[in-house]
């Protein structure tokens, strides 16, 4: 069964990097299924362009399992799964456990369960990939965003384990970006400081993630690898 036309699932595609990659995949001829949590303008845009939207909140096991059930109701095959959904929460005193749990659920439990239950959908595709969007910060740890960093590091570990578990039928890789896009509220001082951290010194935008994603999808020989996309941040 299936198929060159099996869809690519991308999570958290209502804005920014996920939205950009979903639009680029559609423009390149891949059918797309995406998850969204908030009804942002990007959701309507992607629907208009032919993508299938599935509401999902990965804050709990129940929310993740409800998404998997809805996914299976929409398709019996997948070409790839791209885990892009993410939360970057602060760790306020007294609420650390809640923040850690929320980020654990979105960065680790959701990919873990979606991969386990999605493997059968991927098995119907001649070429099959899972891509975890991680973060370059896992390379060195973070004194300020310890929980975010730890849960993304857990995602890096899932890349290795699932790559071994699913080989050779499914390739499993990660992409670890450093700064891609500022938030609109980031001020000039913050922007200057962040830009100075990398050798390239630019805000590259979401296209560098699409380029990396296409490389991983197109390569027949790369699995269990996390691709660093950090503008040479490790050089400074
Ligand atoms: N932007 C950067 O500079 C940068 C740097 C390093 C790594 N990254 C990584 O690159 C990826 C994309 O970054 P981005 O800046 O585009 O992220 P973003 O703007 O924060 O978008 C992530 C999406 O994840 C969804 N999401 C968050 N919590 C969720 C939950 N509990 N359940 C379901 N969906 C949830 C959100 O959905 P809704 O909007 O629908 O609520 C959001 O649109 C992320 O994995 C991020 O960690 C980004």
Image (cartoon, rainbow, N blue to C red):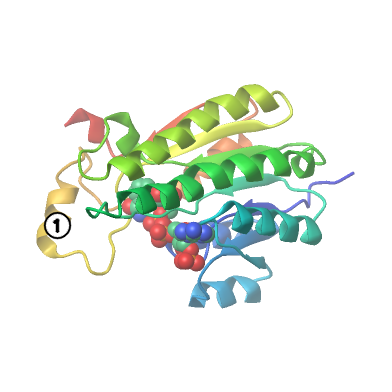
Question: How busy is the neighbourhood of tag 1: few (under 14 within 10 Å), some, or many (20 plus)?
Answer: few
**Residue at (65% x, 38% y) in the render:** 129
Residue at the front extreme?
A: 94
Q: Is residue 206 visible?
A: no
- Where is residue 25 drawn, in percent x and y? 60, 56
Q: In what quadrant of the picture does the C terminus appear? A: top left
Of residues 31 and 59, the one nearer the viewer is: 59
Instruction: Look at the picture and state if 200 lies above or below 75.
Output: above
Residue at the right extreme?
A: 1
Q: Is residue 168 visible?
A: yes
| Image-quadrant location for residue 73 | bottom right
Q: In the figure, is residue 11 to the left or right of 99?
A: right
**Which residue is denoted by mark 1 in the rendering?**
190
The quarter of the picture showing ligand 1: bottom left
| Image-quadrant location for residue 79 | top right
Q: In what quadrant of the picture does the N terminus appear? A: top right
């Amino acid at each position: 069964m299936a198929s060159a036309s099996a869809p690519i699932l991308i999570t958290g595609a209502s804005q920014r990097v996920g939205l950009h990659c979903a639009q680029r995949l559609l423009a390149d001829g891949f059918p797309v299924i995406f998850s969204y949590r908030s009804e942002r303008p990007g959701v309507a845009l992607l629907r208009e362009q032919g993508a299938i939207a599935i509401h999902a909140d990965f804050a709990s096991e129940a929310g993740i399992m409800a998404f998997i059930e809805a996914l299976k109701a929409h398709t019996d095959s997948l070409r790839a799964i791209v885990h892009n959904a993410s939360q970057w929460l602060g760790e306020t005193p007294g609420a650390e456990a809640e923040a850690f749990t929320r980020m654990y659920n979105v960065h680790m439990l959701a990919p873990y369960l979606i991969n386990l239950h999605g493997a059968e959908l991927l098995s119907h595709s001649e070429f099959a990939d899972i891509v975890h969007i991680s973060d370059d910060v896992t390379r060195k740890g973070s004194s300020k965003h310890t929980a975010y960093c730890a849960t993304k590091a857990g995602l890096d570990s899932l890349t290795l384990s699932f790559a071994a578990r699913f080989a050779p039928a499914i390739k499993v890789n990660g992409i670890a970006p450093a700064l891609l896009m500022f938030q609109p509220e980031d001020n000039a001082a913050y922007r200057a400081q962040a830009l100075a951290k990398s050798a390239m010194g630019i805000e590259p935008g979401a296209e560098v993630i699409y380029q990396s994603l296409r490389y991983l999808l197109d390569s027949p020989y790369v699995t269990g690898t996390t691709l660093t996309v950090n503008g040479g941040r490790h050089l400074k």
